[in-house]
Image (cartoon, rainbow, N blue to C red):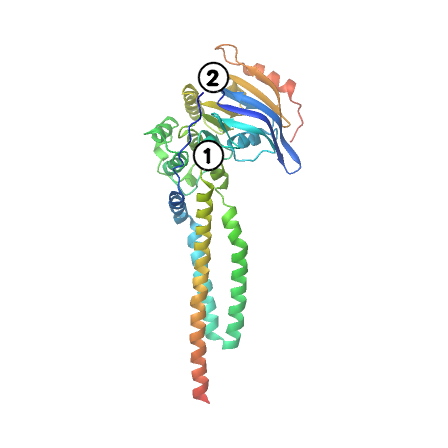
Amino acid sequence: MSSTAPALLVDELVVHYGPRLAVDRVSLALAPGEIVGLLGPNGAGKSTLLLAAAGAVLPTAGAVTIAGHALAGAAAEAKAHVGLADQPPSLYEFFTVAEHLGFVAEARGGAGAGQGEALLDALGLAAVAQRPCRELSFGMRQRVGLAAALVGDVRVVLLDETLNGLDPHATRRATEVIERAAAGGAAVLLSTHLLGVAERVCHRVLLMDQGRLVDERRRDGDAPLSDRVLEQLYVERIADRGVV
Amino acid sequence: MGAPAKVALRLTGARLRAWGRLGEARAPGRRARGLLGALATVGAAGAAAADSAGQASERLSAVTAVVIAALGLAVPQWIFWRRDAALLARLPIDGGALLGAAWRRAAAEASSPASAWRWRRRRWRRGRRRWRCATQRAA
């Protein structure tokens, strides 16, 4: 992890859906190479925060800066360096997996030679590269969404429950790919309910509730965060409101 | 970090339309729409041929009004709402390219019922001429 300028900077971000406040003055900074977990109950505003950080939702107030480019002022430059895997993954149903990656890479200004193929191979998708996206299982779609989030010159990766629904092999492949992207300098913000994955992969974990960041835990040196600690923190900081 | 470099947008309007055509060519809805249009055309032409000129004219006017109203309501939807909107919104695609592609798509969609309407009108005029000739001969 380096201590250079943040790859992702979110400053006092506010997002409303009509009268409902979804994100309430959230500020955070991700350094290049950092993997940050985002935990919180359903409806906490995690997905909205990720969408707003990717430029897919317009914030009511606040600013997002990606790799030095303000999303409000230089949207094209900022969006070229951010990849979002949303939930459920937005895929072109009638494109093949390879075509979908090709389209996203071209839109982002092109990918490195063989980057798409390498990603598909690393995620165990090489065998389905020529299959239309509409024929894929949920887990495969999640992995294609992850590959699409990483293809091109991406400096910030936003993952919305991308590891949900994956079998253990696929989870291992996906986490390896995420860690490799971080080792290459990308900042990763990973929304998840899987505390085990968060404690294993993340350098830092943020807790979000009712649109606000309510707590943070940082990995102590190289030791992983303990899922017991995360669970205890979650239970202490976030009230159980039943069905939300 | 130095001054951020400008990104060259590579997905031009032409490339965006090419990708769009690739997806649309495989979508089953296109074939269904074409079949529906063909059936409607055949039905309207059949009705026009079977009825008297006055009845056919009324029917054609009604069908045309419905088609134009549906088209008028649907075009803004084609332009502003697509299933891939969530994906396109987060990609660095030039707004002009997106709008240009949407207009071309809407124009292409609008032209298919319009050409069917022109064909029906020609067919109806031909029928009316025949009907006049027949009534004149009978008289």
Above or below B126: residue B2: above
Tag of residue A76? 1
| Residue at 66% in and 35% down | A20
Q: Is residue A163 visible?
A: no
Tag of residue B136? none
Element marked by disc 1: helix
The span from disc 1 to disc 2 (Cα, nearest Å) is 23 Å
| Residue at 46% in and 48% down | B102
**Residue type beneath disc 2:** Thr
Q: Quadrant of the C terminus of chain A?
A: top right
Q: Residues within 10 Å of mark 2 (few under 14, many from 20)?
A: few
A37 and A104: which is toward the camera: A104
| Residue at 55% in and 19% down | A205
Outermost residue toward the left in this view: A113
Q: Position of residue A119 (x, y in %)?
A: 37, 28
Is A212 left, or right, of A5 in this rendering?
right
| Residue at 34% in and 33% down | A127
Chain at tag 2 = A
Tag of residue A4? 2
Q: Position of residue B30 (x, y in %)?
A: 43, 52
**Residue type beneath disc 1:** Ala
